Image: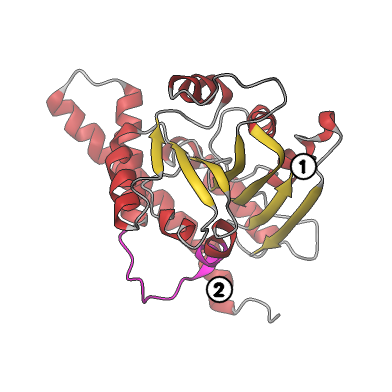
Amino acid sequence: MAGPTREQRISGIRDPGYLLYLAVKSFVLVCLETILRRNRQITEIKDEAFSRFWRLINPPKDPNEPLVGSQTLIPPLLATAAGDVLELGPGSGEQIQYFKPATQVRRIYGAEPVLPLHDDIQANARRHGLGDRYFVVTAGAEKATLIPGLAKAGLLEKKSPGSGVFDTVVCVRVLCSVQDLHETAGTVYQLLKPGGKLLICEHTVNPWTTSKGSYIARAFQFIYSALGWTFFVGNCHITRDIRRAVTEAAVPYGGWARVDLTDHFGWSVLPYVSGTLVKRG
């Protein structure tokens, strides 16, 4: 495989800075509106700002337009989903369309804490013919909100310990923003049925100490973090070791039956790890 071009390397450093600018802009605009409206909590401000930012960077796409960058990793991954599926943090639901080829999917439950995005999720589900199989759950990916949210939706009733709930759990650009990465990864493992699979497509810490990484990109991860990336971009952390966290989640239970993960875009500030982890049967 050919290495990245000079332009790809430059955009891999520059583009996250533009994303940070858009996130700050969304936050400032919502703050200005709040001054006029009054009586809004900071959590409401952050949720509204993030939902605006998310829609801004994920506009409706022309189905004939070719996918680029990390977008290319998602369709083949979600096409392997099966059975009862839990999608953590679907955002506005722009990736729901990629479940359609997965004909073995029975039901999909999208756990999304940002209420302003729920209508977008449901609209996307209907648009792609999954309106009768996609259900939105008001919950985040963290255990403290996910378990109560699933319980309220009636998904944890009559489940024996260790039996699991879902055949597939999907994490696409969500583990970067949870409060406790290791606890969340452990919770996901326990929610999987024996033989169930975890599908991930997440940006991760730059592997700068290896031949696949970039010390320049790693330095910019520190710079963007110092400029407020985590605060403005929906609690997103760009220096987390996602591969290590999801792999270690299964250690107390004897490890995963199969781990098939691949690293991508090591020259970028937003390198990715994607693939499948299968729970022991």
- The span shown in magenta is 59-73
The mark found on residue 170 in the picture is none
Q: What kind of element bears circle 2?
A: helix
Q: Earlier in the sequence, mark 1 or mark 2?
A: 2
| Depth order, front residue of 179/156 | 156
Furthest toward the right, the residue is: 254
Viewport quadrant of the C terminus: top right
Furthest toward the bottom, the residue is: 2
Which residue has dot 1 on it? Answer: 247
Residue in the picture at 33% in, 66% down: 61
- Displayed quadrant of residue 231: top left
Residue 216 in the image: state x and y as whole percent: 66, 60
Viewport quadrant of the N terminus: bottom right
Which residue has dot 2 on it? Answer: 8
* Magenta run includes residue 61: yes
- Magenta region, main secondary structure: loop
The kind of residue on which mark 2 rests is Gln
